[in-house]
Image: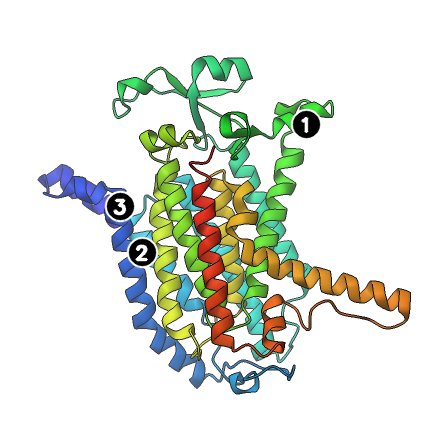
Amino acid sequence: MLYYLIEYLSREYDLPGENMFRSLPFRMSICVILSLIIALLIGNRIIRSLKRLQIGETVRDLGLEGQMQKAGTPTMGGLIILLAILVPCLLFARLDNVYIILLLLTTVWMGAIGFVDDYIKIFKKNKQGLKAKFKLFGQVVLGLIVGMVMLYHQDIVVRMTQQEAEQRGYPIVSKVYDQSDPPLYSGMVYVKSSLTDVPFLKGNKFDYQTLLDLIGLNGKEWIWIFFIPMTIIIVTGVSNGSNLTDGLDGLATGVSAIIALALVILAYVSGNTIIAEYLNILYLPYTGELVIFGGSFLGACIGFLWYNSYPARVFMGDTGSLTLGAIIAVMAIALRKELLIPLLCGIFLVEILSVMIQVYYFKYTKRKYGEGRRIFRMSPLHHHFQKLGMHEAKIVTRFWIVGVMLAVLTLITLKVR
């Protein structure tokens, strides 16, 4: 909103510093600082309110060190994260940008689902919370919306030469003859395509239509039959992975902050015409605004970590954990870096795989030997290390270190082509 106010005032009164305010790095920096301040300022107030309402964590005794001491710790602290993301973004982002609208929808949608889940657990005294089928339905609907928007919205385009667009048969949305484009790019066009960035392949790009063409389907007409289910799986998988990771003080928050920083960098290079060409990645018009959202996301995670680090004064609950994962998934899809998710979100992936492997192996051995056996002492994986006697703070710190390594490797793929 402030973006439009400054834009209006600059037209009317020729305000100094207008170009600085239009700058993405400047607005991103402001959003990081503002979201951090919001989280720090409202954090104490929300924690006191949660305590007054007796909204505390109910803990089952699983034999984990220090676990029972967490009983009664305020939960639903994800509200702090939501406010710290939404307020700066609404103030400093362009609200007519389709990517910003998509991420705002994701934040509110998954925040609402998580809130209902936490509400049922706390106020209805139902430890199961929102039934899994309803939670899954909400994630599927979000994935469906994201997939449809990515495929059919006219502002979600890729830039390439007109010759390449005609050779590949991509529908041209518009020609790049805008005065803001350097003369070098005036002969290019914006097209609708299912291209995505992926390292180590020829041209560093992959077209999902190719998979459909291989099995005899017309890729242009039937691309939705592959892309939309894939989007649903990514959104559901990453949000649930984040939810499972939220089992130790500061774990999910810290890992999400690391991923958020990587996504901010990916958004900046994908939305910058010169850097995208230098790195030989897809230039995605209008994605630069995701830097603003990513900055708000990063600041919110760091600000919440102030209260969530060991020993935690508040837990985010599903209100926060489901939302963090969904935001990460949708940002990666919007930036066409979804094939890098297994690397960038490796912590989430390992956590969710540890649960799946444990459950499958337990059922298999129970069917075969009459008694269930386990691969891990406990799942998700972070609890396995707790059972081995490792202190909670050390586990979290080491997971953060691994998260940093994975984020750096993800960014390295931009150049290793």
Q: Earlier in the sequence, mark 2 or mark 3?
A: 3
Q: Which residue is mark 1?
A: 212
Q: Residues within 10 Å of mark 2 (few under 14, many from 20)?
A: many
In the rendered image, is residue 97 in sight? yes
Q: CA distance from mark 1 to mark 3?
A: 40 Å
Residue 367: which quarter of the image? bottom right
Residue type at mark 3: give it.
Pro
Q: Residue at x 35, y 20 (%)?
A: 176
Q: Nearer the viewer, mark 2 or mark 3?
A: 3
Q: Nearer the viewer, residue 73 or 407?
A: 407
Do the numbered discs 1 and 3 sit on residues whose CB atoms are within 8 Å? no
Q: Earlier in the sequence, mark 1 or mark 2?
A: 2
Q: Is residue 72 above or below residue 144?
A: below
Q: Residue at x 63, y 71 (%)?
A: 384
Instruction: For mark 1, give the secondary structure.
Output: helix
Residue type at mark 1: give it.
Leu
Q: Is residue 41 left or right of residue 343?
A: left
- Label disc, if present, on residue 239 of the rendered structure: none
Q: Which residue is mark 3?
A: 25
Q: CA distance from mark 1 to mark 2?
A: 41 Å
Q: Is residue 329 left or right of residue 286?
A: right
In the rendered image, is residue 96 in sight? no
Q: How is the image coloured?
A: rainbow
Q: Which residue is mark 2?
A: 88
Q: Is residue 311 left or right of residue 18?
A: right
Total number of numbered discs in the rendering: 3
Instruction: For mark 2, give the secondary structure.
Output: helix
Instruction: For mark 3, give the secondary structure.
Output: helix
Residue 30 rendering spot, x and y as whole percentages: 25, 54
Q: Residue at x 45, y 72 (%)?
A: 77
Q: Residues within 10 Å of mark 1 (few under 14, many from 20)?
A: some
Residue 136 rendering spot, x and y as whole percentages: 65, 57
